């Protein structure tokens, strides 16, 4: 099994990948009966759109492990209860000003942001979320009538923020059931503490009877750490965060802009 993070890892800085090279490698993975997994903090629909020709022959872990698909079959959803979602939103705005943070409530089928969100931010979010709905008064989430199962709450801090201090403050204030992980772009993804990319991979590994030594993982950021450390075949990106490279067994020869993941896959096959 080969599992890779997407942004700043598998995808280049133009949010795409070398499709000709991947096609050859994917066909070889299929021939060798190797499962290929896209593992990301972003939305399932966006991941599926990235791999349209192969989507029914691969696996998807989205929202940092909260949603698992095998092809078009939904295997698992780790849903946050609405009262806990509302409590978390209240906690965020009790501790941070509206000019400091923006929230994005992530569901199984769509992502929800406040209707007052500036268009340039909506356009930026569409890089990571294919389905986005604008909601009146998102801060009062429990009254919106949204029935989509909610799996994560994304909190994005302003560029001017003292990010380490803000993140520490956020994590200290969260309900004990919850944790937040950095997902890049000044954004923390809040969800259940027991749910992450590694827990989702364990689900798939049990499903396909894959041992840890038969797993290869790729990542660049904090939300990839557990899946990089769950196998002796974890690869940090050359362009990854220092903390990730320090604790990971291997490192790619090239960065995400130069087919770093595909280079390693090719050598392994």
Image (cartoon, rainbow, N blue to C red):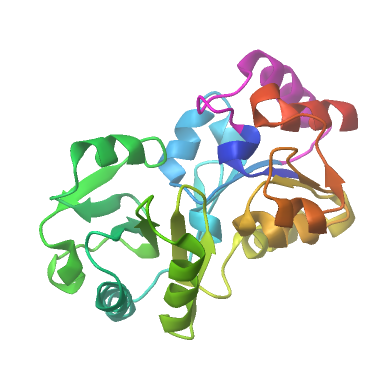
Residue 160 screen position, x and y as percent? 37, 53
Q: Residue furthest bottom?
A: 176
Looking at the picture, tell me which residue is in the foreground, 237 or 66.
Answer: 237
On screen, residue 46 above or below 20: below
Q: Is residue 75 visible?
A: no
Residue 156 screen position, x and y as percent? 37, 56
- Residue 16 falls inside the magenta stretch: yes
- Residue at 62%, 60% (x, y): give it: 200
Q: Which residues are magenta?
A: 11-35
Residue 193 screen position, x and y as percent? 55, 75
On screen, residue 195 above or below 47: below
Q: Quadrant of the C terminus?
A: top right
Looking at the picture, tell me which residue is in the foreground, 195 or 261.
Answer: 261
- Residue at 37%, 60% (x, y): give it: 155
On screen, residue 51 above or below 21: below
- The answer to whether 34 appears left or right of 110 in the picture is right
Determine which quarter of the picture holds residue 96. bottom left
On screen, residue 96 above or below 12: below
């Amino acid at each position: 099994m080969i599992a890779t993070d997407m942004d700043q890892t598998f995808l280049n800085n133009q949010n795409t990948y070398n499709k000709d090279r991947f096609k050859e490698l994917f066909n070889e993975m299929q021939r060798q009966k190797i499962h290929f997994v896209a593992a990301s903090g972003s939305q399932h629909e966006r991941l599926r759109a990235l791999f349209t020709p192969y989507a029914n022959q691969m696996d998807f872990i989205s929202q940092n492990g909260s949603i698992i698909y095998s092809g078009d079959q939904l295997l698992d959803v780790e849903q946050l209860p609405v009262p806990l979602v509302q409590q978390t939103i209240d906690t965020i705005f009790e501790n941070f000003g509206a000019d400091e943070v923006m929230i994005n409530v992530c569901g199984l089928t769509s992502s929800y942001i406040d209707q007052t969100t500036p268009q340039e931010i909506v356009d930026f979010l569409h890089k990571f979320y294919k389905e986005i709905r604008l909601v009146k008064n998102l801060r009062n989430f429990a009254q919106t009538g949204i029935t989509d199962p909610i799996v994560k709450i994304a909190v994005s801090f302003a560029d001017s923020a003292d990010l380490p201090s803000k993140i520490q403050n956020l994590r200290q204030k969260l309900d004990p059931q919850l944790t937040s992980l950095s997902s890049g772009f000044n954004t923390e993804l809040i969800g259940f503490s027991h749910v992450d990319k590694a827990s989702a991979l364990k689900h798939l590994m049990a499903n396909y009877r894959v041992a840890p030594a038969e797993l290869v993982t790729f990542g660049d950021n904090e939300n990839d750490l557990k899946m990089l450390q769950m196998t002796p075949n974890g690869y940090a990106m050359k362009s990854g965060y220092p903390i990730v490279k320090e604790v990971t067994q291997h490192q790619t020869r090239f960065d995400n802009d130069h087919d770093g993941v595909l280079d390693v896959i090719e050598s392994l096959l």
